[in-house]
Image (cartoon, helix red, strand yellow):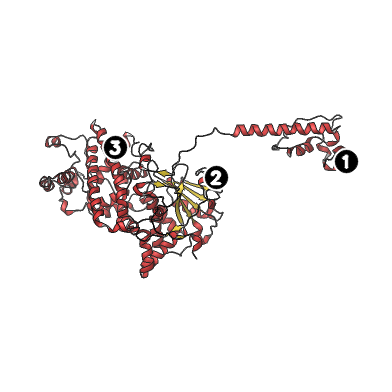
Amino acid sequence: MSINLTNLPKRLLARSQPRSLIPASPRPRLRSLSRPQNRAVRLTPGVACAPRVYRQFIHPEQLESRLDLLAFSATLLLICVGVSLGDYWVEQEPSQAPAQDVAVISEQDIMGQEAHPGRPGNLTADQEEKLRQLWGHVLKLCGVTDENVNAVTEAVAGGAADAASAGDTNSQTGSDLTPPSAGKAEKEKPKKKRISLFGKKHKAVENESPTQGQASPGSMTHIKEGDGEDKYGQTQQFFDALANQSPQSLHATIWSMVKHDHPDALLLRFLRARKWDVDKALVMMISTMNWRLTEVHVDDDIMKTGEAGAVADEQGADGDAKKLGADFMAQIRMGKSFLHGVDKSGRPICVVRVRLHKQGEQCEESLERYTVYLIETARMVLAPPVDTATIIFDMTGFSMANMDYTPVKFMIKCFEANYPESLGAVLVHKAPWVFQGIWRIIKGWLDPVVASKVHFTNNVKEMQEFIEPQRITRELDGQEDWEYKYTEPIPGENDRMKDTATRDKLLEGREHLIRDWEAATIRWIATSGSPEAAAVQVERENLAQKLRVDYWTLDPYLRARSYYDRIGVLQDGGKIDFYPTAAPASGRVAVETSANDLD
């Protein structure tokens, strides 16, 4: 049905449009479509925009025929379409090549990857020298010098008698770092550099017998207590570790933390966190080892017993152990936090569903145990050049009942003091207005570097700046059809941990690789600046790769299987598949649990 505007009564036309907006002209003419001053008019594409502009500039009474009306509408339509296309062409960015798929990572993918600055394979000369210094300090504290490395090497080769003689005449903690292959004449040559923790006032400590087995706090001449920047009291923890831990225990704890990582990468984390200050990095590293060994028992309890151990305590233990196991498993089953997928930089994503936490619902020890377990599990899926993770705090449905400052403080301490340089980005998603005051408090606790990594996202479009839309789950308004469903431990999945004979044999082989690495590192330190250093560094890189492969062979004998092993994210040989299509065949029925299954 068509409407002839020219046949409408003039009084109705006058009411529909104020006369003040009609250009006073005896003949109808199309006026310029320039925008009025101080008023933003946006022309949107389509015919719908024509009547609005038409009423604003031209009164229907001034059109002499329906042909004029048709021509005018067509003109406006062309203008709108032209403006829209112009905006489109101006705003479009050049298309980018599709990002490389990093969902599946294997050993072949790791080889040849370009390292980020400050990482193994991408160090400046000054950074490399700092790394040499830190390795020198660490090896001395662990009782590793050229003499005892020679002793181990000769013992393996059948020269046990010579090794014993070398061990009787040299101190473990006081020898210079000289190449183990150097002859007597070379050892007598003056060295250009001497890396030592011991000052002139502590000559007695340098000659201390290795049978005493402990490093003296007084031997540290450059490290002082009472540092105003020591936020977590790590200097005191450092001296406590030297006083109470043997060099052998520190040595074992360091290598248990290395796991599949490049040994240099672990030390470089502490150096970067302390802005390449060697003394501060050493304090941070040793205090972290003391924390792992004496406070939280990461490798000899949390990762060793894992989820199956918690289920056993939940079902068969009594008292505190039963509650600890039940509280630990309750958090895993509901998916309070979980790992899934990667962001645009290939970093694994940890999602924390804040609404599922209720203050006082689980005991504090279980919260801390669960936090460490998740961080350590996230470390298992890191592969060079990716060495950090992204955390999403999903604040959907948040209320003050979900706010609990104690676990927040513990999490902050973990990342700032014990897992340095592990955070890539933190996304606080859909935070309600009530969280603004809470954030001001939490931000005051954060190191400025950590605080700078926190970003607030309010919708999926803003989250797409960090994560591809097809890899954002539907729960977060994305496109990926995936939801967390916990798979219970499978009977017999940890049977290899009972095979102590195979485990001990593998540990013995790994010990030989570690000694080879340490011997090469001592030569690398001693040959700094010489042509030989490059060849020694190549040897160290080859040994680092062997250590990585060796760890994954040993892993099933040391670490209890996790949910991520059962669903196929972590696979044999260190292969990682962030989006597994099917879990590895096990021949056993797995039981799934989600947050909806819990009361």
Q: In front here: 313 or 54? A: 313
Residue identified by numbered label 3: 129
Q: Which mark is residue 462?
A: 2
Spatial separation of the CA atoms under disc 1 and disc 3:
90 Å
Report the residue that reaches farthest toward the front. 587
* Image height of 566 relative to 387, above or below: below
Please report contact status of discs 1 and 3: CB closer than 8 Å, yes or no: no
**Residue type, label 2:** Glu
Q: Position of residue 563 (x, y in %)?
A: 41, 55
Q: Position of residue 580 (x, y in %)?
A: 44, 49
Spatial separation of the CA atoms under disc 3 and disc 2:
42 Å
User: On the rendered structure, is 339 left or right of 213?
Assistant: right
**Residue type, label 3:** Glu
Q: Position of residue 244 (x, y in %)?
A: 24, 56
Q: Secondary structure at mark 2?
A: helix
Q: Position of residue 326 (x, y in %)?
A: 41, 65
Quadrant (top left/top right/bottom left/bottom right) for the N terminus: top right
Please report contact status of discs 3 and 2: CB closer than 8 Å, yes or no: no
Viewer-side label of 3, 2: 2
| Earlier residue among tags 3 and 2 | 3
Residue identified by numbered label 1: 8
Q: Give the number of marks.
A: 3
Q: Is residue 370 visible?
A: yes
| Earlier residue among tags 1 and 3 | 1
Q: Is residue 283 visible?
A: no
